[in-house]
Image (cartoon, helix red, strand yellow):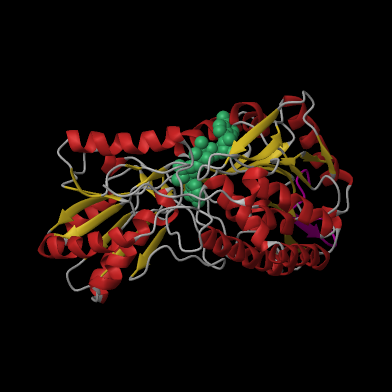
Amino acid sequence: MNAPLNISMPAEASQAPKSYKLLIDGRHIDARDGRSIERASPGHGFVVSRYAQAGAADVEAAVQAAHRAFETGPWPRMKASERAAVLLKAADLIETRLEEIARLDALESGKPIAQARGEIGGAVDIWRYAASLARTLHGESYANLGDAMLGVVLREPIGVVSLITPWNFPFLIISQKLPFALAAGCTAVVKPSEMTSASTFVLGDILLEAGLPAGVVNILAGFGADVGAPMVSHPLVEMVSFTGSTRVGKMTMAAASNSLKKVSMELGGKNGQIVFPDADLEAAADAAVFGGFFNAGECCNAGSRLIVHEAIADDFLGMVKTLASKVRVGDPLDNGTKVGAMISADHMAKVAGYVTAAKTDGGRVYSGGGQLASNAGQYLDPTIVRNVTEDMAIAREEVFGPVLSVLTFETIEKALHIANNTPYGLSAGVWSAGIDTCMSVARGVRSGTVWVNTFMEGYPELPFGGYKQSGIGRELGKRAVEDYTEEKTIQFHRGQRTGWWVG
Ligand code: NAD
């Protein structure tokens, strides 16, 4: 029996929670009905933040403000170079406030502070990348349609966009949407998760300081049914970009169909890492542990299925188990922590339920397996489950916790079958020294990203998104700004009318 985790209380625990107001039309305001949401740190248990809780009237005001800013404000009309300057200034300000933002995300989500710093640093890079794309966004011209015709295809901002984000990477995920929407000239209504809204409100302040005109970005804290749903169905919203669960993504898409909005969906994953005997097994073992337990497994890209060749299974899993036992679980604010707290007690119980069900179905807990005792907060032991079969819930559903399910294979065909035998298609990894093997897996897996001899790296230059029920569309990459545009075809005719109709 391990000693209970000793979680120390940070200075914030003895201070009043920080308060955040809604950002509508450039002003910080309380919710119209005066309600608020309190968020307790899942790692420590004290209330860190209090946000004004938006309702239907606040959504209406935010959408109207975004609509006005789009229809009559300067943002969609200014030069791309001017928009890029605001995005670059915002990136600089985020960098200046990196420590503060990372601490808010760590306190509200339970993620390790060192990891949070990396995420905010990554977000800075994304804001700068989006600024560069603002300058290169362009349409097409066709001078090959005959002497009398010039065809021009414009890229115009799509309009008001609703951006809805989850709790697991609060600042990073809004940074995968908002700078690209802004680069295109759109205006936005943003809803962070009701559990992790603080850093998005800080971003709102940063944008105003960077010179963003009032009403271009409006931020609402609140619950999905009260705030997310009307943001999706509102007739003045032209596009919804949603990151979250596949279940809510489906509801969102159905609601958006009412007014035929464009949708972009970044949803769940059930990603496999496939390990062949000729791989660098030390590197693969480290990546297996990283893939399974990074962000406490609360990650769309989690490598939650380890698909290992039979011939090396025992030895390789021994290496993985040894590494897993060294992973430091504990206080999110401790610089050495690798796995922090679980987002909520309910979610932790759900994750534990998957492990219990797997045991009933014949799975064997090989390492870890339960809640860790602690003086504060909620923590799970990184867990490895062996003897998992493809039909088990733990092999098919997104567990979203620090749980690695092990399946084995003998042929590459079987490995691919296992990898693809899920409704999801977000990402996958392959570990082998053989180019044929790597290429066969990379081509054969039905997922938006495949990592070859590495895992879960990301670059703003590379598109990210899912096949199958992991999503629709791609974020990041050179077309990320185009996603927030409409194409308009203009045909210029010169000279005499050609092709008289009546004669
Ligand atoms: P969730 O689907 O419960 O909530 C996501 C957001 O949607 C929240 O802001 C929530 O308040 C809002 N929402 C809830 N009901 C709504 C409704 N009816 N209409 C509109 N909005 C509504 O997801 P979560 O639990 O916050 O996040 C975890 C999920 O997100 C996991 O499934 C994970 O895989 C997924 N995710 C995907 C990616 C990706 O890039 N593919 C990245 C991170 C997380």
* Rendered residue at 21%/43% (across/down): 390
* Rendered residue at 17%/42% (across/down): 363
Residue 159 is one of the magenta-drawn residues: no
Residue 494 is one of the magenta-drawn residues: yes
- Identify the magenta region: 489-503
User: What residue occupies the far top of the structure in this picture?
Assistant: 33
Task: Report the magenta stretch's main SS.
Answer: loop
How far across and how far down the image is residue 396, in percent? Answer: 29, 41
Tell me if 433 is positioned left or right of 344 in this view.
left
* Rendered residue at 80%/59% (across/down): 492
Quadrant assignment, res 34: top right
Whether residue 240 can be seen here = yes
In the image, residue 227 sits, relative to residue 419, either above or below, namely: above
Tell me if 372 is positioned left or right of 436 in this view.
right
How far across and how far down the image is residue 404, in percent? Answer: 29, 51
How far across and how far down the image is residue 401, in percent? Answer: 38, 45
| Near-viewer residue (92 or 374) | 374
How far across and how far down the image is residue 117, in percent? Answer: 58, 62
